[in-house]
Image: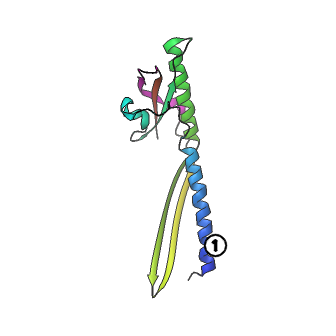
Amino acid sequence: MFTDTMLTRRSAKVLALVVVALGLAACASGAGRNVAPAKPVKNYPAWVLNPDQPGLIGVIGSAPRQEMGGRDAQYRVAMIRARQELARMIRVQIQATSTTRVEERNGRATQDFDSEMRMRANEALRLDRARVVDEWVDAETGELYLHLVTPK
């Protein structure tokens, strides 16, 4: 059924596909969120560390106290940052699944690998449908956090 050379070539192709998929997933994961440096989790509302909700994509925008413009300026900066993060997430969404099956019959092993990856630009996620569902000010630093969500 499979020769060693075919299995090696196929494994190399699958490995390359998985590496590319993981790299793309990392790029789309929102690693650059505008969240303040790590502090004890107990000081933050749960949505700051996990902004997604069922059926919604969530992002966090934050802004330090503003010397000029006060609270209104701080809110605008946090909103701009949240919308920028949402715009990055809207560009590409990736779903990947993989299944590996190994069978042994009469002392011979066969391996079957299925991989499926869907990558799409989701135009249904529009910035004009986004809304702020919560906000929080860190009492220690004065930093404002906005929780922005939009339907998936």
Instruction: Answer with left or right where residue 34 lies relative to residue 56.
Output: right
Along the line of sight, which residue is nearer the eye, 122 or 62? Answer: 62
Q: Is residue 131 magenta?
A: yes
The x, y position of residue 58, in whole percent, is: 46, 36
The x, y position of residue 108, in whole percent, is: 49, 84
In magenta, the rendered stretch is: 125-141
Instruction: Answer with left or right where residue 54 lies relative to residue 120.
Output: left
Q: Mark 1 sits on what residue?
A: 9
The x, y position of residue 89, in whole percent, is: 55, 40
The x, y position of residue 49, in whole percent, is: 43, 36
- Relative height, residue 120 to residue 109 (above, below): above
Amino acid type shown at disc 1:
Arg
Looking at the rendering, in which quadrant would you find the N terminus? bottom right
Number of numbered tags placed on the structure image:
1
Identify which residue is drawn at 38% across, 41% down: 54
Outermost residue, bottom direction?
106
Q: Residue 121: tell me if it is visible.
A: no
